[in-house]
Amino acid sequence: MASAGAFTIQEIGRIGRQTGGRPDGGPSAIFEWTSDRRPMDGNKGGARACPLAPWGIAGTLRHVRTDYSGARTPSVQVLGPSKKASEFAGRWDDRYNFAGYASAEMRRFEAMCERGNLVRIQFQGQAFEGQITDWNFEYRRSNYIRYTFTFDPHTRAGEGNLEDRSPASPKSTQQAYDELDITVAAILDAQDYAPRTALGGTAADDVDAALASLVTDRNAIGDTLDQRELLKTESRPIEAFTRMATQFRQAANDALSILDTMTAYRADLDLAHTTAMSVLDYESWSRSIRFRTRVALGTSRAAALGVEERAEPSALALYRPHRGESLMKISRRFYGTPHCWGLIAERNALSSMTLTGDELLIIPERGTG
């Protein structure tokens, strides 16, 4: 599945109609599994429970072909299309949810399958209604259970009838940095138009000082991302993630400092020469700085949370690939064999095997994918 999204299964009454309960009067089962490391809101969600492989949506055209003797072309009678069954595989893991989650989820899912009712399966913009015809559980331990099941789709569901609760695709660390970099550059440009001759006191200088700290934060984050390979020389790999999160949080604090500085000044009090033109220049400069700084503040806070969420105590390395570099080559680099590429793909929830060079990959220890 994709790197972010809610894989939803809902027990329904009959095709084309979603009911408030099962046909036998019992409550309908609802499962919401995500590839994220944190559970979704509500008690029906499960973190890191989303099926691991892509959803194979396929069909076939049912037809009867007859080859008549002497005919140049066969006679084909088209009976109609039918959808092929899809197989899903994933895991339920207490580590990302709560104690007893895996066993409870297995029992709920098994009970729903045994009832044989229609279900609706949805991931992002794709939704189908049909039946689960086969299910298997690999019970390793009570807090870690793998599952596989087969879904026989009957019809494509009206996607609008079931809310898409997929979270927005998270920005990579590189994307967050690029956004911060562009925003800081915009703030610097706006600062060039500060009405310094009309301002009294130290207003412009105070903003310069606060902005200089934000520029330093941006440069520090850029220096960290410029490193292609991190953590191999560190005794505790998690410290690298903590460092980046701290850098983004410091950027957020410095952005907030700029906003606080701007709040302390007013056109009617801090302009040395109050004229209509000077007031207009002041308001244009002030609003431009404040708007762009709020963008920097939001970007930095979101990036800090994202980096912290990716923290992995057992990480072997944190690696930024080159554009076009293959996962098999990266696997050989760190594990000595190309055959462990799946560990990297699963740990980073990659939806594509084509690397752009903007990713920041977690290289897990073998056996911790």
Image: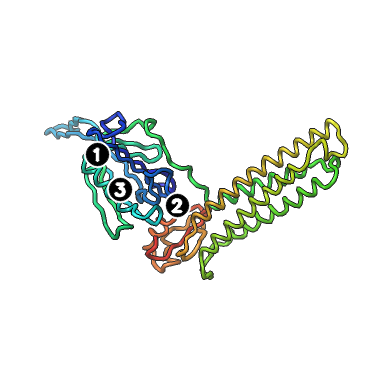
Q: Quadrant of the C terminus?
A: bottom left
The residue sitting at 45% across, 62% down in the picture is: 363
Name the residue type under label 3.
Phe
Residue 131 - label = 1
Question: What residue sits right under mark 3 in the picture?
Answer: 88
- CA separation in Å, label 2 and label 3: 23 Å
In front: label 2 or label 3: 3
Badge 3 local density, few (<14 within 10 Å), some, or many (20+)? some
Instruction: Say which element carries label 3.
Output: strand
Q: Position of residue 44 (x, y in %)?
A: 36, 44
Q: Earlier in the sequence, mark 1 or mark 2?
A: 1
Q: Position of residue 321 (x, y in %)?
A: 50, 58
The residue sitting at 83% across, 32% down in the picture is: 277
Q: Position of residue 60 (x, y in %)?
A: 25, 38
Instruction: Say which element carries label 2.
Output: loop
Question: What residue sits right under mark 2 in the picture?
Answer: 354
